[in-house]
Amino acid sequence: MILHGYWRSGTSYRTRIALNLKGLTYAQKPVDLRTGDQRSDVFLALNPQGLVPALEVDGQVLTQSPAILEWLEERYPEPPLLPSGLGPRAQVRAMAALVACDIHPLNNLRVLKAVKALGGETNAWAASWIQPGFDALEALIGRHGDGWAFGDSPTLADCCLVPQVYSARRFEVDISTWPRIAQIEARAALHPAFQAAHPDAQPDAD
């Protein structure tokens, strides 16, 4: 496996977490989004959308982190990142999508550049989407969590949530507002799979 990603990318971060939780070995090829590596001919040949991550595996290239995470769950079902039962699995997918669809896309690098170009303040912009999203997640964790976002072991929801918390701190959002989310962040900081996936632990980190 070869993971093409960027150390501070939330989508790359969540993919690293899932790979680590599955106990999989993979090489990394950094793609520096700040210098435009994602628009190079070499990378566009892998992913025509020019976004990270891209995962080379089994003679194919997988893109879009939600699809990669689902593929990993199907290809390597142990340890599971989805609970048993249709209802619980849908709940975890919904919690993951709350981050992956409704929060993260609005505060990724290319959107923040556009906001800044239009004269906006990027931290305030990012916080305006993180705060309502985290409000909803805090309530859902209260219903379904038992140490992690859903139940007592990491799921796809945690793979998406923990990188978003990292981003929230970068945007100076006060995480203490959401004590359940803060507890998951603290638990993840002690978990080897999350530690190894952290941006600061990556080979291309500043």
Image (cartoon, rainbow, N blue to C red):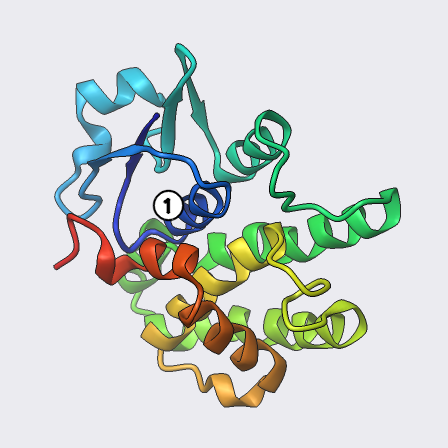
Whole-percent x, y for residue 64 in the image: 48, 34
Q: Judge from the rendering whether residue 122 lies leftward or rightward of residue 31; answer left or right.
A: right
Residue 50: x, y in percent? Answer: 32, 30
How many labels, in total? 1
As drawn, is 134 to the left or to the right of 166? right
Q: Is residue 205 left or right of residue 150?
A: left
Q: Quadrant of the N terminus?
A: top left
Q: Quadrant of the C terminus?
A: bottom left
Q: Residue sitting at 58 percent across and 25 percent down?
A: 75
- Residue to which mark 1 is pinned: 12
Q: Is residue 53 above or below residue 164?
A: above
The amino acid sitting under disc 1 is Ser
Q: Where on the picture, by quarter, is residue 51?
A: top left
Give the percent coordinates (x, y) of residue 110.
33, 49
At x 17%, y 38%, the residue is 36
Q: Is residue 179 left or right of residue 39?
A: right
Above or below: residue 64 compared with residue 195: above
Is the residue 160 above or below the residue 124 in the image? above
| Outermost top residue | 59
Residue visible at 43% across and 82% down? 173
**Residue nearest the viewer, comparing 112 with 143:** 143
Of 183 and 115, nearer the camera is 183
Q: Nearer the viewer, residue 154 or 49?
A: 154
Q: Secondary structure at mark 1?
A: helix
Q: Please state the horizontal and vertical placement of residue 95, each as a whole percent of the image.
A: 68, 57
Bin the neighbour count of mark 1 within 10 Å (Cα to Cα): few under 14, some 14-19, many 20 and up: many
Give the answer, above or below, for where 149 lies relative to 15. below
